[in-house]
Image (cartoon, coloured by chain):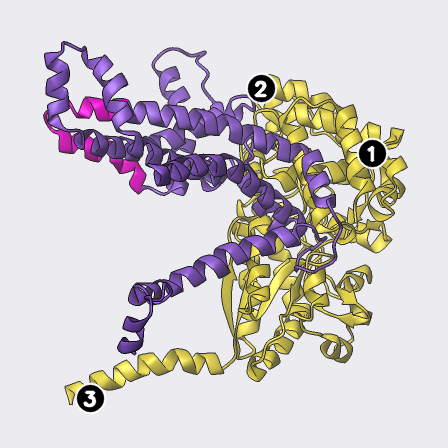
Amino acid sequence: MTGQANAGRPNQLLRNLNAKIASIPMILTAVVIFLGGTVWTVVYSFTNSKLLPRLSFVGLDQYERLWAAPRWLVSIQNLAIYGVFSLIFSLVIGFLLAALMDQKIRFENTFRTIFLYPFALSFIVTGLVWQWVLNPEFGVQSVVRSLGWSSFTFDPLYNSNIVIYGILIAALWQGTGLVMCLMLAGLRGIDEDIWKAARVDGIPMWKTYLFIIIPMMRAVFITTLVIIASGIVKVYDLVVAQTSGGPGISSEVPAKYVYDYMFQAQNLGQGFAASTMMLITVAIIIVPWAYLEFGGRKRG
Amino acid sequence: MKLRLLAAALAATVVLPLGIANAADLEVTHWWTSGGEAAAVAELAKAFDATGNHWVDGAIAGSGGTARPIMVSRITGGDPMGATQFNHGRQAEELVQAGLMRDLTDVATKENWKEIIKPSSLLDSCTIDGKIYCAPVNIHSWQWLWLSNAAFKTAGVDVPKNWDEFVASAPALEKAGIVPLAVGGQPWQSAGAFDVLMVAIAGKDTFNKVFGDKDEAVAAGPEIAKVFKAADDARKMSKGSNVQDWNQATNLVITGKAGGQIMGDWAQGEFQLAGQKAGTDYTCLPGLGVNEIISTGGDAFYFPLLKDAEKSKAQEVLASTLLNPKTQVAFNLKKGSLPVRGDVDLAAANDCMKKGLDILAKGNVIQGTDQLLSADSQKQKEDLFSEFFASSMTPEDAQKRFAEIIASAD
């Protein structure tokens, strides 16, 4: 065996054989479960499957119905608002907290624990806590009113126009701690000498952050972005715990539409169509970015 | 010696659960979790345990909308329970067609269900292709308006006798700081309230045309426009009832914080549990006091096909226990629903239940929307009405969308 291998060129397939064998389970999982499941879902989204999947194709009917459904449109709009604001705010707040933390303050460990702690709670618990905090009868509104401002109104969860921001608050409270930690790790990875050089050149601190440190933290930012973005697309449990989509349908999100139509309405076809749309949205964002990112790295 | 005892004890703990499993214990899933409901389901469990079998309670909290997906996925996923609640009608239709449910025709013929179950439409809803697949346990009607006598006393007005009087009394209630109409935030509640308004205002024939024949023209017509106007009133009256669950909304009526609630007769179990008496503490108006018609939807138990012979036998026992006259009386009194047998004596029934029995005897009944519409159409309706009740959508726009749903309904 070895003699033969030595004689010809080493077979590409047999290189690092151990590693390849070891990764077979993962490859299978990825292909069968992720790819297979995705293809299956997309195929069945063109059928009129009700409670049980069945292959009777109806063309684009499910998609036409989906995009005519007011609830789906509200869901998409909510996701867009929630997505943009949660991305911006968690990055900005997370970075600011990390930068403050990085000023060699006292009790850094304590603060870090406090800020990160909400992340240890599930979305369901977070949602319930904030449901109480924002409840007009027990929460912020009643506290402020009992202090004397009797006409103070703050009931985001019961107001259709701003309910999504009520959810956003809870999401930021839960998620910024993690962003802060990632950013802090990035800041700590910057060489101390860069700071010294900037100080010697007399560059003000905010400028150093903005033009030197942040560009150097590119990799950390991208990791953070992916983590936040995936959290945005799949937001579901927070909404269920806080408002269950209400008042009315004003805080519905796409993931909830998928679940409700697949299981409550017993209409798998419609649910699959909605989840395929979610996949396409993600693909539109991820693919060009991944192409730039990883395509670029190969060249470099 | 000690060691042996310990070993024996350990062995016993291992053997014990298995031993019970052989003596046919059936897991029964249902979504009866509010106080009144739990008391009622305990009666069923007691009756089944008395047959020597064992009722393993599998209550799933969060109302039918949450529970049904769990039940369905357990059945389709190959982990069926012994028996499960559904609203009979179309919720389990596909499960039956896929051969996942057990045919109960043998038990039904032996016990003569065709004769004893009244009205016969209940059994029809259990019948698919001439075979019987479920055991109805009660009749639940949606068409009730529950009024808090105390709330009207506080507001200084008489307790209304019909929907119009109720609407007229709303300003007085509001002035007294009482929410006129309690509507919970769960989507099925507003959709159900609309169906009730439809029967009361547009009548039985229109109801059947819209939901039975799926007649789009009628759904877009002037009769339904009146219903949407009434729904608009209901929407205004429900402002400020910031609760989610139906029993929380009922509780607002029980405590006099709300004037009334449109809710099915299952609300009665809550009044009973709170120690309130029909007539003195609360008033009930079937058909909103306008059209005394009730729907005959309800709950039924379906039995998934099981491989275990012992359990299958226990399923038969459970099916006949559910329809036993004694169980029917005990269960329905606690639940506030009507029995499915015409031949049982409900002397202990309260005023409201007697009203319901009366209407039933007169035959003023319609089929429930669960029996007429698929889960998919029901869901679309729920989406529409939960949006309507929480927003300022005009009744005209809402009616247009309603007609579209009816046009594509199945």
> Relative to A56, is A90 above or below?
above
Q: Nearer the viewer, mark 3 or mark 1?
A: 3
Location of mark 1 (residue): B201
Q: Amino acid at mark 2?
A: Ala
Location of mark 3 (residue): B4
Q: Nearer the viewer, mark 2 or mark 3?
A: 3
Q: Position of residue A211 (x, y in %)?
A: 27, 17
Q: Amino acid at mark 1?
A: Ile
Q: CA distance from mark 2 to mark 1?
A: 28 Å
Q: Nearer the viewer, mark 2 or mark 1?
A: 1
Task: Tell me which numbered mark, 2 or 3, is placed earlier along the sequence.
Answer: 3
| Circle 3 chain | B
Q: CA distance from mark 3 to mark 1?
A: 76 Å
Q: Which chain identifier belongs to the yellow chain?
A: B
Q: Amino acid at mark 3?
A: Arg
Extreme residue toward the front, this view? A7
Q: Secondary structure at mark 2?
A: loop
Asked if marks 2 and 3 fall on the same chain, the answer is yes
* Residue A111 colored in magenta in the image: yes
Q: Is residue A111 visible?
A: yes
Q: Which residues are magenta?
A: A96-120
Q: Main secondary structure of the magenta part?
A: helix
Task: Tell me which numbered mark, 3 or 1, is placed earlier along the sequence.
Answer: 3
Pick whichever, B130 or A86, lies toward us. Answer: A86
| Quarter placement of the C terminus of chain A | top left
- Please identify the quarter of the rendering in which residue B316 is found: bottom right
Residue B176's label in the rendered image is: 2
Task: Tell me which numbered mark, 2 or 1, is placed earlier along the sequence.
Answer: 2
> Relative to B386, is B366 above or below?
below
Q: Which chain identifier belongs to the purple chain?
A: A
Asked if marks 2 and 1 fall on the same chain, the answer is yes
